Image: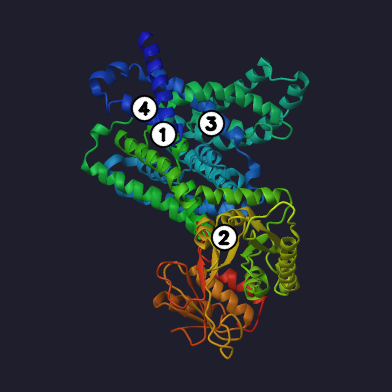
Amino acid sequence: MDLLLLDLVIVLAAARLFGALARKLGQPPVIGEIVAGILLGPTLLGPLIGDRLFGPEMRPPLQALANVGLVLFMFVVGLELDQKLVRGKGRIAVTVALGSTVVPFVLGCVLALAVADEHVGGDRTLPFVLFMGAAMAATAFPVLARILTDRGMQRITLGGLALASAAVIDVLAWTVLAVVVGLAGAGEAEGQWKVLLALPYALVMFLVVKPLLARLVPAYEKAGRLTPGLLSLVLIGLIGSAWATEWMHVHFIFGAFVFGTVMPREGAERLNHEILERLEQLAVLLLLPMFFVVAGLNVNLRELDLSSLGTLAAILAVAIGGKMLGSYAAARTQRLPARQSWTLAALLNTRGLTEIVILTVGLQKGVLDDELYSLMVVMALVTTAMTGPLVRRLYPDRRVARDIADAERAALGVSAAHRVLVIVPEPPAGQAPLTGLATTLALAAPTPPSAPPSPSASPAALSLSSEVVLGHLRPYPAGRLEVGSGLSSELAELAETLHELETLAVAVRERGPECRVVSRFSADVAGELPGLASGAGPDLLVLPAGLPGHAGVRDGATCRVVTVVAVPSSGPEVPSPFEGTGPVAAHHDVGGDAAAHVALILATSQGRPLVLTGGGRASALARRLVRLGVEVTSGPVPQGALVVAADTANAPEGAHLLVRAEQDADPVDWSGAVSALRTLAAPAVRP
């Protein structure tokens, strides 16, 4: 007994210490708890110390306590399984879940067939093959939820879709695992007939037990709190359900999980919350960390050789490649953008708690041997540890913050207008071409996915989701103002400036978008312009190249920036490239998608020919746009063309517009862009 108590102290202390260390490193605590178990086991301590502390006689009582924690944990997972997650996202969530499950499952079965002779034999081959497929297809719903919550991603569409897909994967994984465990249990002579009771058990749980449990709600409301009697009834039912599935050789985790899923939902929010509060304290703080440490104790990395490393590499390739590619391909079939698809795939690749539970079942049922169990635990650690950093790289915090702001606006019923900020230099009266360019770009604003544009919609109708802001800072007059000198001349100048800006605004409104003017005096125009730009929160920024503080404004902006380069006049007989019907030429090279998109907008809206230059990339894009119905050619820049290029160090001389893409930009959806532009001007796009 003294050794058991000492083991409990060591296990709990190590779990807390390494769990806290993992959390400091930005990893889920389960990573630290499993590593603690591995370090306490034969891998580090070896047989001399490890066998004395955690010898064969100590493993059964530790495993028994860990199993109790696992029962409580699986009940909590079933109780927290929110069926509402899939509502409204059913088709895409199911599609992604199937891709994320079927591809790694099939690859896992193929890998299992390749290594079956080394690890199993005889009648265990079929359960082993199916088990490996199920283990490769698993996704850790609780760890995924924690990762999303830590970054606030559960508040955005992508996070909700990840949770919905993971919920479907959970159901698929546990169903497949139940079949596998049933096949493994059927191999025992005394248990063959018991496995057949699994289906009647499920029917009884959902058709009989679930209505009975619904009576807990009025009993709870009458008592006003969770009484010991009510909690005892829940625990008796939970343990009885776990015993029933274990007796049927289907494993106790399924009984605990199913009992959690049949708990009442409607009107039972407070009841379930109190049950979770009571059980999570015991399970999460004491018994569940013990389960993961005990799982780590069963890992012995000392016995691995070079052939084991080859098997580990194959396991990692199948687990990561199958899950990522399957999830990504399924998401793309639902027209999810590439960045969101890869992020979703990375999120669903996390395995953590669920994988360790599955592997423990396989070890207990004799489907896995010790070597393969150790390798699969390493795979679970790697796939879980890589999720956080990979998701942060694919979907940076700036992108999450932007999506959260959009979600909050949508929740408040505020339309997320596409805002174009144009910085108007002195004198405003001569800046009609600049504001006209901004208006054209605003008219081509992307419409929200929830409200795609009608083919018959007019430009004015499309522009209702767009806004042009005319920003102007006027320097204070030179010379010191004396008391009594008056401000009449300065006020007159400001009134004249506002009149000129309002004239520009009227021209913008006549074309469709909303327009407002922001103008004031400034003691430091170059220093205050970046603040004006960031405060407006634009989706697109248009500014002239000769603007005071141009570099600071451009570099401080996170949105797409279009810089209008001043073009020296060649005489009144030479038309401006911003006017007329001359071609629009875009330099399309590395990083030039945004520039080509702006050129496409200008050519389409003004009925001008579009030419793409820049070699192979330009030719490939030209062919793609031609297939979409756009009249475009590739070749050298024509004489008198309006030249658009990427705002980089390699920008060509003579460019009229320099375009810098927004930070963390998605690739341009050319099909969607062309579809949106068809309604603006038909001449450049064939019907």
- In x, y percent, where is residue 332? 52, 60
Q: Name the residue under label 3.
A: 74
**Nearer the viewer's eye, disc 2 or disc 1?**
1
Position of residue 636 relative to residue 145, above or below, is below
Q: How far apart are marks 1 and 4 (CA)?
A: 9 Å
Mark closest to the chain's N terminus, 1 or 3: 1
**Residue annotated with mark 1:** 31
Q: State how far apart marks 3 and 2 are (Cα).
A: 32 Å
Disc 3 versus disc 2: nearer the observer: 2
Q: Name the residue under label 2.
A: 334
State left or right for residue 222 relative to residue 78.
right
- The image shows residue 602, relative to residue 161, as above or below, that is below
Image point (65%, 81%), residue name: 682
Q: How crowded is mark 1: few (under 14 residues within 10 Å), some or many (20 or more)?
A: many
Upstream in sequence: badge 3 or badge 2: 3
Disc 4 from disc 2: Cα separation: 41 Å
| Residue sitting at x 56%, y 75% | 600
Amino acid type assigned to the residue bearing label 3 in the image: Met
Task: Classify the position of the N terminus by image quarter.
Answer: top left
Q: Which of 79 and 666 is in front in this view?
A: 666
State the image coordinates of residue 483 (x, y, percent, origin top left). 72, 51
Q: How packed is label 3: few (under 14 Cα within 10 Å), some, or many (20 or more)?
A: many
- For disc 2, the neighbor class at 10 Å (few under 14, some 14 to 19, many from 20) is some
Q: Earlier in the sequence, mark 4 or mark 2?
A: 4
Q: Say what amino acid the circle numbered 1 marks.
A: Ile
Q: Give the residue number, with chain letter if any, for mark 4.
A: 36
Q: Along the polypeptide, which appears first: circle 2 or circle 1?
A: 1
Residue 109 visible in the picture: no
**Quarter holding residue 588:** bottom left
Q: Of the residues under marks 4 and 3, which one precedes in the sequence?
A: 4
